[in-house]
Amino acid sequence: MEPRTKKRKSKEVSMPVKEAIMELRNHKKSTIRDIAKTLGVSKSTVLYIVKKQERTGGLSNSKRSGRPRKTTVMDDQKMFAILEKNPSSTVEQIKITLQNVGIEVSESTIKRRLHQQKIRGFTSAYRPMVCEETNPMGNTLPVTNFLGWCEEMGLELSPKVYISSEGTVAQYGMMAREDILVGEVLFSIPRSALLSQNTTRVHDLLLKEQETLASPSGWVPLLIALMYEATDSGSPWAPYFGLWPVLDPPDLPMFWSDKEKTTLLQGTGVSEAVKKDLENMEQEYESIVLPFIQRHPHLFNPEEHSLDLYKRLVAFVMAYSFQESLEEEEEDSGKEDNPPMMVPVADLLNHVAQHNAHLEFTPVRGPVPLVYSISELMCVSPGIQDICLKCSLPRSRHTPSPYDLSFRTISA
């Protein structure tokens, strides 16, 4: 018995066959059944070709626009962070982990993203492992990309330090290669590398709508800038986003369930504070941010630039943004506080009470007396031209924390 021949799908029908179908249909007035029998194709294929010719006036397949991107830059970074935390993760495990935090992505998309980043995967039946290629210096690809971006932006990094996720308190951090003397500059950042409402590509739009974006927090313009830049793989800051920490819902109380907050934070006052913060975020998004998004559908859409993303970015700005203090004359004149902004590299320094690095603001690049310690700053102003970070070693004595309340993560 001869094997049964698989019929072609309509989209695979050659042009001569299409022309033959229309010849029989138009000139010989053949029925759909007769045409299918004569040419050896299915009736549904014949009907599809006839209807298409009637609808479009032609037989050629229209040019396809291409497959839309399935993941955002932040989704990709979450994917890579899962691998960094557990290099033995399989594609299926990555998919499940992403689903648990509300990110729906297929296994084929995950494989494609890993391949694009030159991350090699191994079949789980033999070797359930995914590892990221490294360069001879031991830097992982995100760090390599980021360092290349720093060089392009004119950001100067001391050869005595390096960026890594190994041996740090959390996420990526800055490590010392050798002893650092008091007063040595660790890095300096040009104004053009900072990310704020004044440097984003939608700056003109934010400036135009500054009155409608006014809010009690004063953070809306920066958050919109981050929403726009962080979800665009073509952003000038894309290599910087590659080092962003992934904000998993379990990591922060604001993403916990009411039961978890009540049980684990009872008596601390944190649960009540988190509830108030969430209410403020939702009110700010619904009344200010969402209307702005809807007014500019060519740049934003509610599905991608969602309330969930907004909450995550608020948490990120809370922890990693910087702000320049006002001068005495500015304070006396009643000037409002400078808005927050993101400072690449500076946000890699983990915050501790017993700090050993000082952050200072100068109008020009170069050594100046130490002014501010890193533990005293939350954010940095867009009004400066350069930011210089200097290191001074802590004294050899125990320095107690100035805070009287501490929190501990409790494993179940």
Image (cartoon, rainbow, N blue to C red):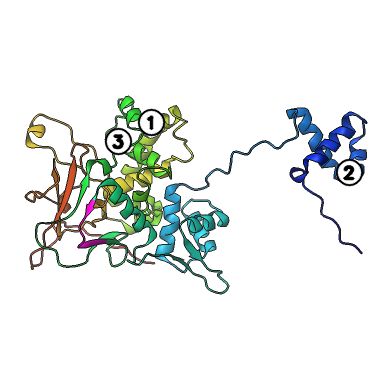
Q: Kindly identify which residue carries mark 2.
A: 39
Helix, strand or loop at label 1? It is: helix
- Give the labeled residue for mark 3: 197
Above or below residue 186? Residue 211 is above
**Left or right of 223: which side holds 90?**
right
- Under tag 2, what secondary structure? helix
Give the foreground label among 2 and 3: 2
- The quarter of the rendered structure image containing the N terminus is bottom right
- Callout 3 secondary element: loop
User: Which of the two discs, 1 and 2, labels the residue nearer the N terminus?
Assistant: 2
Magenta-tinted stretch:
156-162
Q: Quadrant of residue 139?
A: bottom left
Count of all numbered marks drawn on residues in the image: 3
- Residue 291 horizontal/vertical position (percent): 42, 29
Residue 42 at x, y percent in the picture? 85, 45
Do the numbered discs 1 and 2 sit on residues whose CB atoms are within 8 Å?
Answer: no
Quick one: which residue is furthest to the bottom in this view? 126
- First reached walking from the N terminus: tag 3 or tag 1: 3
Q: Label 1 belongs to which residue?
A: 287
For marks 2 and 3, the one nearer the N-term is: 2
Give the quarter of the figure containing the C terminus. Answer: bottom left
Q: Is residue 380 above or below residue 204?
A: below
Asked if residue 272 is among those painted magenta in the image, a careful observer would answer no
Q: Residues within 10 Å of mark 2 (few under 14, many from 20)?
A: few
